[in-house]
Image (cartoon, rainbow, N blue to C red):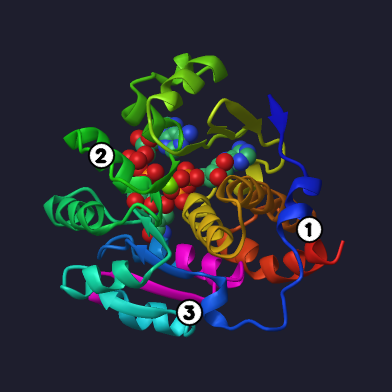
Amino acid sequence: MKQLTEQLAQAVVRPRQRNTYKGSFGKILIVGGNAQFGGAAIMSASAAVYAGAGLVSVATDPVNRSALHARLPEAMILDAASSALETAIRQATVIVVGPGLGTDNAALAILKRVFAAVEQTQVLIIDGSAITLVAAHHLDYPNAQLIWTPHQVEWQRLSGLALPDQTVTASQQAARRIPGIVVAKSSQTHVFVGDDVYENMAGGPAMATGGSGDTLTGIIAAFAGQFQPLKQAVLAAVFVHSHVADIVAMNSYVALPTMVIQELPAYLKQLSES
Ligand SMILES: NC(=O)C1=CN([C@@H]2O[C@H](COP(=O)(O)OP(=O)(O)OC[C@H]3O[C@@H](n4cnc5c(N)ncnc54)[C@H](OP(=O)(O)O)[C@@H]3O)[C@@H](O)[C@H]2O)[C@@H](O)CC1
Ligand SMILES: Nc1ncnc2c1ncn2[C@@H]1O[C@H](COP(=O)(O)OP(=O)(O)O)[C@@H](O)[C@H]1O
Ligand SMILES: [Mg+2]
């Protein structure tokens, strides 16, 4: 088993080239945020913007429009239930589906449309409610570059492994049956990619707040849109999320998602110059 380190993140997050524009740094689409969980989509989108994504759009319940624009004017917005969803998917390089999506029939319909429209070359990050829906409805895995970000109960739903049975070996075997990269989140997150297992020693209980996982999806999306290869981008994103939370936690009892998001640009600058 390998460790996620700052050196690994340094190798990924490099200074920006001069001859670039917003399209050079990823076109991210976040699909999530129903009427109850709008904050999840806002935190995911905010994390993506603050982690350097060039363009970020959010397909969500229209009830979230004012809140999203007030918090994050950098993001564009569309109604996830409208036909604009397919257009936005076509234009995206990286798609996140699930943060605050919910698990009702409307959410299932949106998820099915995402799975039908996504293409093989696109990165699709499947999180939260979307994982629960895939497991509950036995949905076929879409043909794209998949990244799964389950917490322990979502991993139980997806893998069939009860929490006490989620050993590294058992989770690795289960992850092998699922296409793509699996980021199995916990107080000691493991990333399963091909035959490799990476352990994340960064992070701590100051992160135990609703929205921490939603924030991680935005950072992974931003890194997938900016850095290659995809595997290194994902590993660096998982480390950076937890390490920035550790920095926040040096002076704060809790590392709230919004605090971690605020701290991202300064840490990425430091990382890129080291
Ligand atoms: N501000 C917003 O809009 C927010 C919106 N959010 C969105 O809400 C949606 C649902 O996501 P979810 O994670 O809250 O619900 P679910 O998948 O049912 O899992 C919870 C169940 O599992 C149990 N449990 C046991 N161990 C656990 C563990 N290690 N980690 C986690 N859970 C553990 C736990 O047990 P309990 O703690 O109640 O004893 C409970 O029974 C999703 O789309 C997400 O993005 C959230 O991000 C919050 C902020
Ligand atoms: N005690 C802890 N130690 C380290 N990391 C933690 C701890 N508690 C939560 N986290 C991290 O916070 C995130 C929680 O994700 P998740 O449960 O999906 O949150 P949400 O859905 O509320 O956004 C994961 O990245 C997890 O590793
Ligand atoms: Mg979550």
Residue lying farthest to the right in this orientation = 274
Badge 2 is on which residue?
A: 134
Q: Residue at x 35, y 72 (%)?
A: 91
Left or right position of 174 against 196: left
> Residues under labels 1 and 3: Cα distance?
24 Å
Q: Residue at x 38, y 25 (%)?
A: 177
Q: Is mark 3 within 8 Å of ligand 1?
A: no
The numbered mark at residue 263 is none
Position of 167 relative to 254 (above/below): above
Left or right position of 47 against 270: left
Binning the other alpha carbons within 10 Å of mark 2 as few (below 14), some (14 to 19) or many (20 upward) gives some
Badge 1 is on which residue?
A: 251
Badge 3 is on which residue?
A: 71
In depth, the one of 55 and 107 nearer the eye is 55
Q: Residue at x 47, y 85 (%)?
A: 73
Q: Which amino acid, mark 1? A: Asn
In depth, the one of 273 and 71 nearer the eye is 273
> Residues under labels 2 and 1: Cα distance?
39 Å
Q: Which amino acid, mark 2? A: Val
Position of 47 relative to 231 (above/below): below
Q: Residue 250 placed where, x, y %?
A: 79, 54
Q: Residue 21 placed where, x, y %?
A: 58, 83
Q: Quadrant of residue 67?
A: bottom left
Q: Earlier in the sequence, mark 1 or mark 3?
A: 3
What is the secondary structure assignment of the residue under circle 1? loop
Q: Is mark 2 within 8 Å of ligand 1?
A: no
What is the secondary structure assignment of the residue under circle 2? helix
Q: Which residues are magenta?
A: 43-62
Binning the other alpha carbons within 10 Å of mark 1 as few (below 14), some (14 to 19) or many (20 upward) gives few
